[in-house]
Image (cartoon, coloured by chain):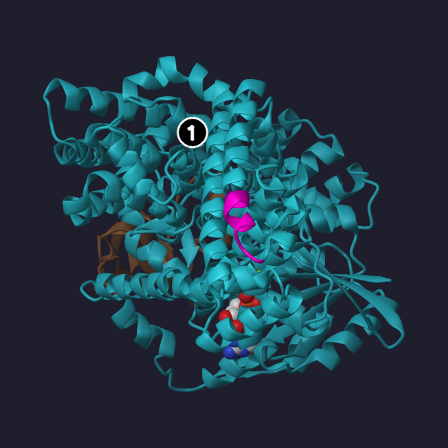
Amino acid sequence: MIKVALAGQPNCGKSTIFTMLSGVNQHIANYPGVTVDKKTAYLSHGGEKIEVVDLPGTYSFSSFSLEERVAKNYLIDENPDVILNIIDASNIKRSLYLTFQLLELGRPVVIVLNMMDVAKRRGLDIDAGKLSEMLKVRVVEAVGSRNIGKKDILSSILEANSHKATGFEINYEELEPYIARFTEKISIESEIAPRWFAIKALEADDTVLAKAGIPKEEMDAQYKKIHSEHNIDIDSFLAAIRYQSADYLYHKSVKEASEKKETLTSKADKIILNRWLAFPFLAGVIYLVYQLSIVLGYKLTNYTWPYLAMVKNFIISILPEPQFIDVPMLTDFGIWMTNSALALLNYVPIFLILFALIAIIEDIGYMPRIAFILDRLFKRFGLHGQSTLPLVLGGAFIGGCAVPGIMATKGIADDRARLATILTVPYMNCLAKVPFYALLLGAFFEGQMTTMMFFISTVTIFIALSVARIITLTFLKNRETAPFVMELPPYHLPTLKGVVLRSFQRVWLYIKKVGSIVLAVAVVLFVLLQFPGASDEVVSEMRADADAALVKFDQTAKKTQYYETLKDKENVYKLVNLYNSYRAQKMIASSPEAAEKLDVAFREANPVLFGFISPDDADQKKINREVRGLARASQTILNKLKSEKIETSFLGMFGKSLEPVTQFAGFDWRVNVAFLSSFAARESAVATIGSIYESGKTDARAEEAISEDGLYTPLHAVAMLIFMILTPPCIATMIVVRMQSGSYKWMVFAIFFPMLLGVVMASVFFNIGMLFSLTGVQTMFAFYLFMLASAIILGFVKGKSINWKGGYLEKNQ
Amino acid sequence: MSEKKILPLSEMQTNQKGRIRTYSVQGLLKQKLYNMGFVPGSEILMVRTAPLMDPIEVMIQNYFVTIRKDEAKIIEVEVI
Ligand SMILES: Nc1nc2c(ncn2[C@@H]2O[C@H](COP(=O)(O)OP(=O)(O)OP(=O)(O)O)[C@@H](O)[C@H]2O)c(=O)[nH]1
Ligand SMILES: [Mg+2]
């Protein structure tokens, strides 16, 4: 097997070439845990098996960023047989800077001049033969986005692998004697050329110095010596020579068109980055992304939901049937798990659109421009220009989702800003919180819904910014920050294949990773809610109720001609189940025809019993009425039992044990349980509250049940809203926080910090409201003003941010 | 025009051209700046300032790059 590593500067088309080489049916392995992943594909050409690895883009091989570390460590540790160096043909001069360093590795290199189309359009006449001659390696021309060059690349890889020749070497002039000395001195067991290690050692590369066992003190002495003897600063000297060599090669092999035309990118940027137009344009793009993904995607879920509901009905149909009020544990469990999984899958259309749009924006090259436009604002809060998109995805308006938001933080170069963004995105407005808001607003603020919703949806950005500033001034104070030096790449048209592929890959990753963990948590929650279960006393009381209902049914049935069938309890249970499942399926029937079909199917399957559900004669009608009563009665009893169960369950006990703390915010154990169960997915908060309150009342909607209960005032509701706005982060988000921050520590922090903040804020404003006898809306407004003021004030707090100056040299001067 | 005009990169005017002089910088920033092409002797063109007045966009080594004024302050440029 030939191991091929794709290396190149950011945005030169590595991933495009990777996809072109491996085709769609590639086996893609993602390495979790690292923020920047490398991808591997396997293919074969000319009877040889080839493994291709797509490395992150790097300008150089210092250890400046995570990407550079990943790429460098791969090249050192994995010893690729061939390095495929992708070069942006329209930007050869800068690309060669990395090429020289790759050549120093001493491994066979093949250069791919990608984006030949762009180069031609710019009037660049590139002499690939000349370039190949000077660099002493194979040079292939390609247009990755149009699938041009695949064959040449593959055969060049095979050739390069069989003639292991070394390429061109830069002459570092005054430094050569030192390089020679280090080359002899360093003995590292590796296929990489000793010369490369020597140069890296001169650059004071930590990884290499550690590998070679050279103590820093010795390097310092060397540095000082070189500095005093030749009056050169090594880094500046190396960089200058590399750029000069690149310049030389460039002028030897490329002819520029005599008159320089203004590029399309320059023209476009005159508008897109214009002082007055930049913001309207950006707002337009964000609005469009939001409309297409969240709004349209949410509408799409209306079309996909029936399919998921069909799956759910199917699963219910194969689970053991309930015997009136005796629901087998397996059935309960099956339904619970199905609901948890479907809650997650329900958002897939949103994610597909969202990820596709992100891929498009990334490919076009607008991302770094967003950073350019907004950096100054975000910098004030310890964030980065590149934090914009993650925050918007997290829900800058009425609803987003923290999961894709956090996933989009990957590209942020500044470590502290990236972590701060990861930890801040969960404060944005999660789409799944909306039903919960709707429930509470519907119950307590019917007349002021719009006002309240406006507060809720706009306060989040102030909260997020405040939190970002607070954590960057405290917990993240000593995190590495990075200088803001970023390429603004030329605009490119995205390729359909690349966009679709990336979107599906990301969704699949999400389903796989997040799905498995959400299900695991669902199991735990189920156990905590089921056990130890309702007391025997309650159970027998309920059983008595159930028996009474059955007796009543029996008495009516006795007076009809159908008593022969309905004498049998089994048949009665079956009838109730049949009625329930018919109702459930009728609800998702898409058209009158479908409903009719459903009737026919049901009648065929249960010719006798279905007669009582869709009655013809008088007797059947009588029984029909009774069946409905019976179904309702069983539901009531089951609900009562369930709420009883929840109250006595472990989670219920836990909720009660939290009351001493949460009482300050006005939360009783029921609210606590609802919030606790919303961990699995926020939707379950509504479901839990619903089922606790549904107890006893059958047909009343949860809104009515809560407001009629009289336990809570609008002030209570505001406290709940404040808590919900700040928290609780759902499990899926936590997993992604873990994935992207690479540490459980931050995950735990991301769970407890919002909780603490939520309880404190809810308590403070609940009590302020009580003290000044404010209305719910007034209290909410007070909270809003407080967060607004805090964001403004914190924006003016200066923090230290220049610890990147603490590099190797500075410490020693 | 015989007089050399020297300024920090952060204070260049839009569309002004210059040549980078030797400047003193340390640590990670040094690596980053050199890797991105801010090497002494290179020609540089000030393209534009961001709508909020920071960062700036410049053209160097034939490509566009954005840099915060904080960092650009360090780089000395001789206007040409
Ligand atoms: N016109 C043109 N565009 C191309 C070509 N190859 C790639 N692109 C586009 O260039 C952009 C960047 O391509 P990628 O493959 O993502 O670049 P990359 O090197 O993997 O980028 P990083 O992973 O960020 O380092 C995309 O918009 C591609 O569609 C090409 O040959 N011609
Ligand atoms: Mg890539």
Q: A570 and A459: which one is in front?
A: A570
Answer few, some or many: residues within 10 Å of disc 1's Cα (few below 14, many 20 plus, some between 14 and 19): some
Name the quarter where the N terminus of chain A is drawn.
bottom right
Residue A318 appears in the picture as rendered: yes
Residue pictured at 49% horizontal, 18% vertical:
A653
User: Does residue A211 appear left or right of residue A430 in this picture?
Assistant: right
* Residue A656 to residue A419: above or below: above
* Residue A184 to residue A71: above or below: above
Task: Please state the horizontal and vertical placement of residue A676, each as a whole percent of the image.
Answer: 46, 30
Magenta stretch: residue A556 in it? yes
| Quadrant housing residue A298 | bottom left
Q: Amino acid at mark 1?
A: Leu
State which chain is coloured brown. B
Task: Please state the horizontal and vertical placement of residue A167, each as a whole percent of the image.
Answer: 74, 65
Q: Which residue is mark 1?
A: A476
User: Does residue A318 appear left or right of residue A46 in this picture?
Assistant: left
Task: Please state the horizontal and vertical placement of residue A498, each as a whole percent of the image.
Answer: 57, 71
Magenta stretch: residue A325 in it? no
Residue pictured at 61% horizontal, 47% vertical:
A573
Task: Please state the horizontal and vertical placement of residue A655, each as a whole percent of the image.
Answer: 45, 21
Q: A3 and A261: which one is in front?
A: A3
Part of the protein shown in magenta? A553-561
Main SS category, magenta section: helix
Residue A35 appears in the picture as rendered: no
Tell which residue pokes out farthest to the top in this image: A660
* Residue A142 to residue A480: above or below: below
Query: Is label 1 in a helix, a strand or a loop?
Result: loop
State which chain is coloured cyan. A
Chain letter of the residue beneath label 1 in the structure image: A
Q: A553 and A181: which one is in front?
A: A553
